Amino acid sequence: MARVSVRNVWKEYGAQVVLENVRLEIADHEFVTIIGASGCGKTTFLKMLLGMEQPTRGQILIDGVPIRGEPDPDRGVVFQRYSSFPHLTVLENVMLGLELRASKLSGRMFGGARRSAHQAALAMLESVGLAHAQDKYPAQLSGGMQQRMSIAQAVICKPKILLLDEPFGALDPGVTADMHQLILRLWAENRMTIFMVSHDIQESFQLGTRLLTFDKLRHDPQSPEAYGASVTYDLKLERQRSSDSAAQVALGA
Amino acid sequence: MRRLINQHPGRAAGIALGVLPFIALLILYVMASQIRLAENAGDKLLPSLGTITDTLHHYAFEEDRRSGKVLFWADTWASLKRIGAALGISAALALVLAVCIGVIPRARALLSPLLNTVAMIPPLAVLPILFIVLGLEETSKIALIVIGVAPCVARDLALRVAELPREQIIKAQTLGASTWQLILRVVLPQLWPRLIDALRLSMGSAWLFLIAAEAIASTEGLGYRIFLVRRYLAMDVILPYVVWITLLAVLTDLALRLLRARAFRWAEPDR
């Protein structure tokens, strides 16, 4: 379960208002896509969901509980770049979350526990189509493969919420289509609530069950920083949200 | 004819070109030495290669009558012990400081101004203090090298930690990493190759401080020997000692480079 409530959230940097009075109720297992012009605060919104930034006013709750003010395993993330660890192989990257959870002191697993984590990570890699690259380092992978790994790395920890910050923005169009299928399938299989920031309108309509646009409601030409952006459109997209049909969409897309 | 910037030497030619200046220098030395010795057979400034070899043989394979030690190797061992201990301590100290400063904001606020100030102290200026406080034994010599090397390495490493993409640090937290786990699994492993680079770069100043300390107060060591025989204009000892120190430094550098390439394959530019 991961219902998200955003209650009158403001984000201000000094006199500059980035977001004003954002109010949202997001149901469990929603796929929320967020679009808007650059600088409209959509990434700031994502950072607040993640705990990287704190709202200056208002609060964000998951299942009725205020979120922690720092990132935690409830909220997985895939950035556009740099979200993998260059010193670990693909397999080690995916195993890392399991190892951190199992051993507070060394952050490593040994023996049987390690073998089963190894199996789980391998299965995850299989599922995102990266099993053949398990022993490579991230720098040896193409952009699309790196994002697959990064998604696998996040999803294996079974986060309640998965945050995607323009994850496919730097990829070739052909690769992007494959990634769309992948993320829809993982969304259906893992029952996460997904928030995805995108600059691609078509992608946002195609993937989302709910689409938000961020923009300024008011504009003061004399002082453009006086008003912040808020949610201007909040569209519920017509698509059956049951896991089966989502999987079908994924396979048929 | 292609431009000069596009003409690459082959493998053999590349090696030959690299060796060429060394041979040229050697020939130049031998010629200059012969000219001087022809004028004055007792000249000490540019001894012949024969004289140098004889002296070196005496130093490296015969026991010193007074101390009963083979001086060349005793000096080498004494110096290597000092520089090895000092570099080890510097590396450990720098690593701990850099990780604290780079990862923990409170530690950064506490330690960063201090480190930046300490790094500016000219180490040789505190050498008298070290001799007074720590005595003339090994401790003060090692301390001088540590004071000279550790702050620079620490600053360099702290910068490297700061260069780690913020996305990585956030991602690790979303995978459940505590501060300790983040240091252990994300920050430290990425710092090792940087540490090797930093040590390689500070090797020159480490030797500088070692020889300075040995020159002033010591009873053995490569730097001590050079400054001791200087009184007798014994270029036949000084020259091979300088070459030997250089060779040791070059070999250490090479060893560190190989270690980096072997142990941290992920950090190599072209795999």
Image (cartoon, rainbow, N blue to C red):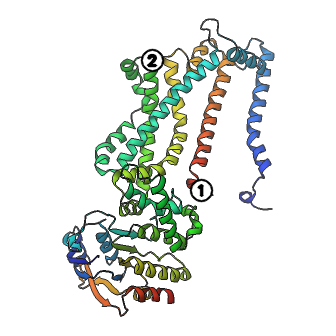
Number of numbered discs visible in the structure rendering:
2
Instruction: From the top left corner, tell me how far across and down residue A2 is, in percent.
Output: 29, 76
**Which residue occupies the foreground of this view, A31 or B4?**
A31
**Labels 1 and 2 within one chain:** yes
- In the figure, is residue A97 to the left or right of A225? right
Q: Which chain carries label 2?
A: B
Q: Which chain carries label 1?
A: B
- In the figure, is residue A87 to the left or right of B93? right
| Residue at 76% over, 25% down | B32
- In the figure, is residue B192 to the left or right of A14? right
| Residue at 59% over, 12% down | B231
Q: Which residue lies furthest to the top in this view?
A: B66
Check disc 1 and report its element: helix, strand or loop: loop
Instruction: From the top left corner, tell me how far across and down residue A60 is, in percent.
Output: 23, 73
**Which residue occupies the foreground of this view, A83 or A182?**
A182
Instruction: Find disc 1 in the rendering and name its residue.
Output: B269
| Residue at 58% over, 62% down | A136
Label for residue A86?
A: none
- Identified by mark 1, the residue type is Pro
Q: Quadrant of the N terminus of chain A?
A: bottom left
**Which badge, 1 or 2, is on the more N-terminal residue?**
2
Decide: is A11 above or below A27.
above
Instruction: From the top left corner, tell me how far across and down residue A77 is, in percent.
Output: 39, 69
Instruction: From the top left corner, tell me how far across and down residue B243 is, in percent.
Output: 66, 28
Q: Are marks 1 and 2 in contact (CB under 8 Å)?
A: no
Q: Which residue lies furthest to the bottom in this view?
A: A238
Instruction: Find disc 2 in the rendering and name its residue.
Output: B137
- Identified by mark 2, the residue type is Glu
Check disc 2 and report its element: helix, strand or loop: loop
Is any part of residue A238 visible from this angle? yes
